[in-house]
Image (cartoon, rainbow, N blue to C red):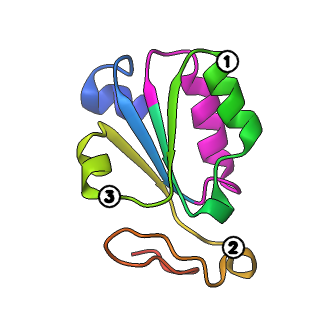
Amino acid sequence: MFTIREELGTVNGLTITFVGDLKYGRTVHSLAKLLQHYHVRINFASPSQLSMPTAVRDSLKKAGVEVKEYHELTPNLVASSDVLYVKFLRRMGDCRGIHFRTGATMRAGETE
């Protein structure tokens, strides 16, 4: 949150896209919950097996946040985002063989 404010001057009015492992990433859960107190639009882009937990999505929607979910990261989605928050796939036992369309395929254990 601090970095967003420092770099962009505000949080309100932004479109923030979370990318990658949204199921196991505790930091993405915390940031998403904090963002429900701002006027933002949130996109979730992840392999279907690693989607943001339903409870987090429901909490955001209940707070009036516009939430969209995608299973591939397209150039249009990137271009429409003010902020990209990337949580790489790290849990090899749970992610082996999961592919996420980004123009390149992300595989478990890759960080670039």
Q: Position of residue 21 (x, y in %)?
A: 60, 60
Q: Mark 2 is on which residue type? A: Arg
* Label 1 CA crowd tier, 10 Å (few <14, some 14–19, many 20+): few
From what the image shows, is residue 30 above or below residue 93?
above
For mark 3, give the secondary structure: loop
Q: Which residue is mark 1?
A: 62
Q: Which residues are magenta?
A: 21-41
Q: Position of residue 75 (x, y in %)?
A: 25, 56
Q: Answer left or right for 60 relative to 1.
A: right
Q: Nearer the viewer, mark 2 or mark 1?
A: 1
* Mark 2 secondary-structure assignment: loop
Q: Are marks 1 and 3 in contact (CB under 8 Å)?
A: no
* Marking on residue 74: 3
Whole-Å distance between the Cαs marked 1 and 3? Answer: 27 Å
Residue at screen point 58% across, 35% down:
31
Above or below residue 73? Residue 106 is below
Give the spatial CA distance, label 3 vs label 2.
24 Å
> Mark 1 vs mark 3: which is more N-terminal?
1
Amino acid at pointer 3: Thr
- Quadrant containing the C terminus in the rendered view: bottom left
Question: Residue at image x 54%, y 25%?
Answer: 35
| CB under 8 Å between discs 2 and 1 | no
Image-based side of 81 in relation to 95, left or right = left
Question: Is tag 2's residue or tag 1's residue first in the polypeptide sequence?
Answer: 1
Splitting the image into 4 quarters, where does residue 13 fall? top left
Q: Which residue is mark 2?
A: 91
Residue drawn at point x = 33 percent, y = 19 percent: 10
Instruction: In the rendered structure, find residue 108 and report the number of the disc placed on it.
Output: none
